[in-house]
């Protein structure tokens, strides 16, 4: 299944997501990027129901960018996380709830690195490390059959792509 | 999972795309049309395939064709042409639409292939197959695909994939409609009956 993980360090947040886009038993894409760049120093990682993930994440992404255009400065990671939670909560009891699980990772000039865990019921928690998916139960020791992961690091200089992790082939 | 058809498209060596589909339209156990055209020719550089509910696909893709008319004094890009139905689907979430479509085209960025479905999923990729016969088609094409495949070999491979899928999938059948998307637009390569193809590919099996 889909997998997200985030770890907060003293002055950075490291996040990784698997690269599979699946439709029931068929793997439609094996190089799919599940991270959405909300701003220069904020990433939103999104998994869940097909369609909902991209639509909800892009909606948040565009609104965060709109805030910057209107006000001249960016939303902080904490503000972006709470904004996301509010939207998810508002849709939860509507006719069309979004079934998405999120990790929001960001670096704030004043507060430093932050990692926020959010689930489809719009529970929000700031945590030093977090994960979504079956892998979350095995965060210390993984046995996953996901072939590759996209890894990114956020620190005071912004978002950096790390080398994509392939699992060693047998 | 969509039902009632098999469609297949992939990008290959020279960056061009081939889209193939079968033509059976079924209403439960009854075949309502043997020669239904499951592709919409949006413009000379854009094609959309249909699988799932025939009515939904036709309606929404013709609506898409209308939206794809000249915007900003230039032809619409494949990325935009696939984002439009994806966003339209968002508005109808949970209402039971059933559409599995591939938008193929050639624009300024080169060849483009997107898979769009009724959940609002939109994926860009090198190869997709949709419909109830998609698993069979994936299997055949995945094993026969090479990076340096020639045009004739690609036509054969794609017909082989569709023929095997329609052989095993009761909801697919009829004729294979083969289109080839090139830099100067699409061409309709041929229209072959599936039973003829099966005789070619499965000699000795029956």
Image (cartoon, coloured by chain):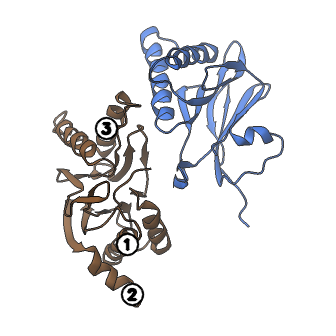
Q: Residues within 10 Å of mark 1 (few under 14, many from 20)?
A: some
Coordinates of residue A18 in the picture (x, y in percent): 63, 45
Coordinates of residue A65 in the picture (x, y in percent): 46, 20
Task: Find disc 1 in the rendering and name its residue.
Answer: B167
Q: Colour of chain B?
A: brown
Under circle 3, the secondary element is helix
Q: Residue shown at 42%/73% (left/top)?
A: B148
Q: Residue furthest bottom?
A: B204
Task: Find disc 3 in the rendering and name its residue.
Answer: B85
The earlier-in-sequence mark between 2 and 1 is: 1
Q: Is residue B169 above or below residue A147?
A: below
Q: Nearer the viewer, residue B161 or B142?
A: B161
Q: Residue furthest right?
A: A140
Of marks 2 and 3, the one in the foreground: 2
Residue B206: numbered disc: 2
Gap between marks 3 and 1 measured at Cα: 31 Å
Q: Residue shown at 35%/34% (left/top)?
A: B89
Chain ID at mark 2: B
Q: Is residue B122 visible?
A: yes
Q: Residue shown at 80%/42% (left/top)?
A: A138
User: Share a chain, discs 2 and 3?
Assistant: yes
The earlier-in-sequence mark between 3 and 1 is: 3
Q: In this rendering, would A100 be left or right of B3?
A: right
Q: In this rendering, would A80 be left or right of B34?
A: right
> Can you tell which quarter of the image residue B26 is in?
bottom left
Q: Which chain is blue?
A: A
Coordinates of residue A19 in the picture (x, y in percent): 59, 47
Q: Is residue B48 above or below residue A102?
A: below
Q: Is residue B196 above or below residue B83?
A: below
């Amino acid at each position: 299944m889909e997998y997200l993980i985030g770890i907060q360090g003293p002055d950075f947040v490291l996040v990784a997501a698997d690269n599979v886009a699946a439709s029931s038993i068929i793997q439609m894409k094996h190089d799919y990027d599940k991270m959405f760049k909300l701003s220069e120093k904020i990433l939103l990682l999104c998994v869940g129901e097909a369609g909902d993930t991209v639509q909800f994440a892009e909606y948040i992404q565009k609104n965060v960018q709109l805030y910057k255009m209107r006000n001249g400065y960016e939303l902080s990671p904490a503000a972006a996380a709470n904004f996301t939670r509010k939207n998810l909560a508002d849709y939860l009891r509507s006719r069309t709830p979004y079934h998405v699980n999120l990790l929001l990772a960001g670096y704030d000039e004043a507060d430093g690195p932050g990692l926020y865990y959010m689930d489809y019921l719009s529970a929000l928690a700031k945590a030093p490390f977090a994960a979504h998916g079956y892998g979350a139960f095995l965060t210390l020791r993984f046995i996953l059959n996901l072939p590759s992961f996209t890894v990114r690091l956020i620190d005071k200089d912004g978002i950096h792509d790390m080398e994509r992790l392939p699992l060693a082939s047998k | 999972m969509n039902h009632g058809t098999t469609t297949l498209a992939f990008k290959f060596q020279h960056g061009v795309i081939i889209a193939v589909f079968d033509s059976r339209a079924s209403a439960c156990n009854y075949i309502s049309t043997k020669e239904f055209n499951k592709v919409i020719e949006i413009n000379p550089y854009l094609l959309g395939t249909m699988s799932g509910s025939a009515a939904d696909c036709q309606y929404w893709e013709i609506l898409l064709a209308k939206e794809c008319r000249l915007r900003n004094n230039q032809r619409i890009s494949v990325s935009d042409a696939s984002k439009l139905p994806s966003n339209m689907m968002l508005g109808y979430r949970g209402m039971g639409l059933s559409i599995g479509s591939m938008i193929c085209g050639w624009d300024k960025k080169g060849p483009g292939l997107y898979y769009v479905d009724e959940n609002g999923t939109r994926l860009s990729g090198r190869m997709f197959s949709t419909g109830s016969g998609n698993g069979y088609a994936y299997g055949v094409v995945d094993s026969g695909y090479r990076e340096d495949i020639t045009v004739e070999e690609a036509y054969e491979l794609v017909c082989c994939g569709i023929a095997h899928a329609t052989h095993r999938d009761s909801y697919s059948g009829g004729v294979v409609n083969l289109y080839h998307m090139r830099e100067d637009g699409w061409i309709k390569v041929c229209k072959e009956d599936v039973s003829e193809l099966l005789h070619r590919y499965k000699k000795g099996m029956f």
